[in-house]
């Protein structure tokens, strides 16, 4: 049953969205209110004509006409939503149609004892789902006022004689249909709001990715790299396993930009980043440190192991072909490696990796150099 209702809802949502203006779909709260409103309209478009036909069966043609006229009003709500680009006005109009219909039906069914009185409870539900809590409170008050007014008129014997030929049948059908309508409404409401929560989760995920990833290459940005490095430092200080930082610089990148254009340079950075990202382990961390520099954090890896690993990366980058570089020029990288030393700061480790990178450039680029601290230890 759960699967069936989920499939029905998934098919229903695209239909509902056709009536939601594009600008409302840009706002999650507005989208949720619009979905709730249109779901309520769909229910009303089924229930109200059913009652029109039922009143004809019970011999009350006037109440039947009230229902059919109200159904026309309900069917206009989606068009009103598209025209106003707001959920507030269509929701209020929808509630007015239902409210006036209930008053009209109740006045012909004997007043406060009519089975339609309990249906006034749907007005606050519609208002809350379609326009928010404030509208729900207002319509709760209006529904209570209507019931008090109906009771007063009933006491004063102002209502016409009842013409329905089977009031007991009407009461049973009214009660059953109210329970069924509210149950379906709550199911749709729950599905719509679950869908809204899913959209919110997706939006938060996108925001989180934007906060931690580089916009051009899609790999981690500098802030996230430093955060992960600090976390790894805390773990290593406690447990003692090694890790290494590798600063990677694309050689002669300014010349690439000047010769082939910045668009080609961007493509080079993307392809280099993708190549390295695909080669590292899930436990490692890789990202853009700034400009044409990347930072690779190798977990559980000492300087010698890190040197061997990034040397293989260097060779693969050198062997790559870049269509953006029309003369077939190859791209190379220089790498500085520094293994974290117990209790030093991440800034100090990065400084040593930067010094090693400077040595790699000084030695002619396209090579891997390990920090002098590790060389002295070995």
Image (spheres, rainbow, N blue to C red):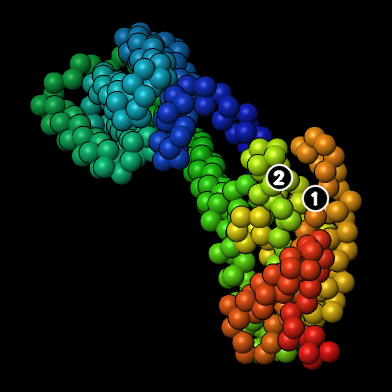
Decide which of 73, 280 is in the foreground and name it.
Answer: 280
Q: Position of residue 101 (x, y in %)?
A: 30, 20
Q: Are marks 1 and 2 in contact (CB under 8 Å)?
A: yes
Q: Residue at x 33, y 36 (%)?
A: 131
In the image, residue 289 sits, relative to residue 28, either above or below, namely: below
Q: In the rendered image, is residue 327 in sight?
A: yes
Name the element at disc 2.
helix
Give residue 160's mark. Answer: none
Decide which of 275, 30 is in the foreground and name it.
Answer: 275
Name the element at disc 1.
loop
In the image, residue 72 sits, relative to residue 353, either above or below, namely: above
Q: Position of residue 124 (x, y in %)?
A: 31, 38
Give residue 256's mark. Answer: 2
- Separation of marks 1 and 2 at Cα, in angstroms: 9 Å
Is residue 182 left or right of 62 when viewed as pictured? right
Decide which of 159, 271 is in the foreground and name it.
Answer: 271
Quadrant containing the N terminus in the rendered view: top right
Q: Residue furthest left?
A: 156
Q: Which residue is mark 1?
A: 331
Q: In the rendered image, is residue 55 in sight?
A: no
């Amino acid at each position: 049953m759960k699967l069936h209702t989920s499939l029905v809802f998934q098919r229903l949502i695209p239909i509902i969205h056709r009536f939601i203006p594009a600008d409302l779909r840009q706002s999650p709260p507005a989208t949720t209110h619009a979905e709730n409103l249109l779901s309520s309209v769909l229910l009303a478009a089924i229930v109200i004509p059913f009652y029109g036909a039922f009143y004809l069966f019970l011999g009350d043609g006037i109440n039947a006409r009230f229902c059919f006229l109200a159904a026309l009003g309900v069917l206009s709500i989606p068009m009103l939503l598209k025209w106003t680009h707001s959920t507030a006005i269509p929701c209020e109009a929808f509630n007015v149609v239902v409210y006036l219909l209930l008053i009209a039906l109740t006045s012909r069914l004997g007043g406060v004892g009519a089975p339609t009185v309990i249906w006034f409870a749907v007005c606050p539900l519609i208002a809350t789902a379609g326009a928010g809590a404030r509208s729900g409170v207002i319509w709760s008050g209006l529904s209570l006022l209507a019931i008090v007014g109906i009771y007063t008129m009933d006491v004063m014997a102002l209502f016409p004689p009842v013409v329905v030929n089977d009031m007991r049948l009407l009461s049973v059908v009214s009660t059953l249909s109210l329970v069924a309508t509210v149950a379906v409404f709550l199911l749709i409401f729950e599905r719509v709001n679950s869908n809204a929560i899913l959209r919110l989760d997706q939006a938060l995920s996108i925001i989180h990715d934007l906060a931690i990833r580089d916009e051009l290459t899609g790999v981690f940005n500098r802030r996230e790299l430093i955060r992960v490095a600090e976390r790894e430092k805390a773990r290593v200080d406690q447990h003692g396993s090694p890790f290494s930082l590798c600063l990677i610089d694309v050689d002669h990148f300014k010349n690439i930009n000047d010769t082939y254009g910045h668009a080609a340079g961007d493509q080079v950075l993307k392809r280099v980043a993708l190549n390295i990202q695909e080669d590292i382990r899930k436990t490692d961390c890789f990202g853009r440190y700034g400009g044409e520099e990347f930072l690779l954090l190798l977990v559980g890896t000492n300087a010698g192991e890190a040197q061997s690993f990034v040397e293989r990366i260097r060779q693969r980058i050198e062997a790559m072909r870049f269509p953006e570089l029309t003369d077939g020029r190859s791209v190379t990288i220089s790498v500085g490696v520094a293994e974290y030393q117990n209790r030093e700061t991440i800034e100090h480790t990065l400084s040593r990796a930067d010094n090693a990178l400077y040595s790699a450039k000084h030695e002619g680029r396209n090579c891997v150099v390990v920090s002098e601290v590790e060389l002295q230890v070995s």
